[in-house]
């Protein structure tokens, strides 16, 4: 059995796409996932299953949610090793003491033609970012809600993303390794 991290995008945000985590766990057990644990209500899942393709698992999760709730959230699945590497590769260790200002954008795939110039044109002077494989790191000390760059990451990279702040990344990793 392998450990995986599932990141659902856009659930329980602004009163839309509501899913109770207790119900989500039941749905995921129904598709063969085991030892399922969640962190907060925003779609952070740690689970085990027989080793298989990440995209296949993500599609199964999205379809199972669609079958039960009528909407299909974007779901990214990472292996524990991949998630650990994302943490280890954090290019902004000085920002780790500001957990709400440091964000990890997990990408569905490596961008083929990222428009870095577009991001550079809208970034604030205080913001720092770096693209490393399938993770886009953003340090936004003035807040993510005020960041024009944060709002344009997915469009500029040309791939599906879902973001988590440093605190959430660490909590998810802690769940996965305990």
Image (cartoon, helix red, strand yellow):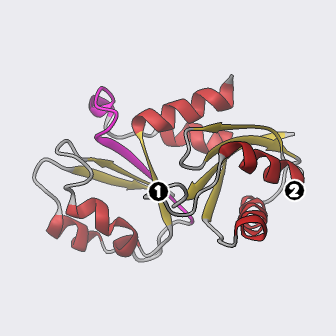
Question: Which residue is farthest left?
Answer: 125
Q: Residues within 10 Å of mark 2 (few under 14, many from 20)?
A: some
| Circle nearer the viewer, 1 or 2 | 1
Residue 22 appears left or right of 168: right
- Which mark identifies residue 13? 1
In magenta stretch: residue 97? yes
Q: Is residue 172 above or below residue 49?
A: above
Q: CA distance from mark 1 to mark 2?
A: 25 Å
Corner quadrant of residue 145 = bottom left
- Quadrant occupied by the C terminus: top right
Residues shaded magenta: 93-108
Q: Please provide percent x and percent y for residue 27.
A: 80, 53
Q: Secondary structure at mark 1?
A: loop
Residue at which label 2 appears? 31
Residue at x-position 27% and y-position 30% = 94
State the residue lying farthest toward the front.
Answer: 15
Q: Nearer the viewer, residue 174 or 145?
A: 145
Q: Is residue 68 left or right of residue 100?
A: right
Judged left or right of residue 40, residue 19 is: right
50 within the magenta span = no
Q: Is residue 49 above or below residue 175?
A: below
Q: Can residue 16 be seen here?
A: yes
Q: Quadrant of the N terminus?
A: top right
Q: Residues within 10 Å of mark 1 (few under 14, many from 20)?
A: few
Look at the numbered disc 2 and give the secondary structure of its residue.
Answer: loop
Residue 141, position as x, y percentages in the image: 20, 41
């Amino acid at each position: 059995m392998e450990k995986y991290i599932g990141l659902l995008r856009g659930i329980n945000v602004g009163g839309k796409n509501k899913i109770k985590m207790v119900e989500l766990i039941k749905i995921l057990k129904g598709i063969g996932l085991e030892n399922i644990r969640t962190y907060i209500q925003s779609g952070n899942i740690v689970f085990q299953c027989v080793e298989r393709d990440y995209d296949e698992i993500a599609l199964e999760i999205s379809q199972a949610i669609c079958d039960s709730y009528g909407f299909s959230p974007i779901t990214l699945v990472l292996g524990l090793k991949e998630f650990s590497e994302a943490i280890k590769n954090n290019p902004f260790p000085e920002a780790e003491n500001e957990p709400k200002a440091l964000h990890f954008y997990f990408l569905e795939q490596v961008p083929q033609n990222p428009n870095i110039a577009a991001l550079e044109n809208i970034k604030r002077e205080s913001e720092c970012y770096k693209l490393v494989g399938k993770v886009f790191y953003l340090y936004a000390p003035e807040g993510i809600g005020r960041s024009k760059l944060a709002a344009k990451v997915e469009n500029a990279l040309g791939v599906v993303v879902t973001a988590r702040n440093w605190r959430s990344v660490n909590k998810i990793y802690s769940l996965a390794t305990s």
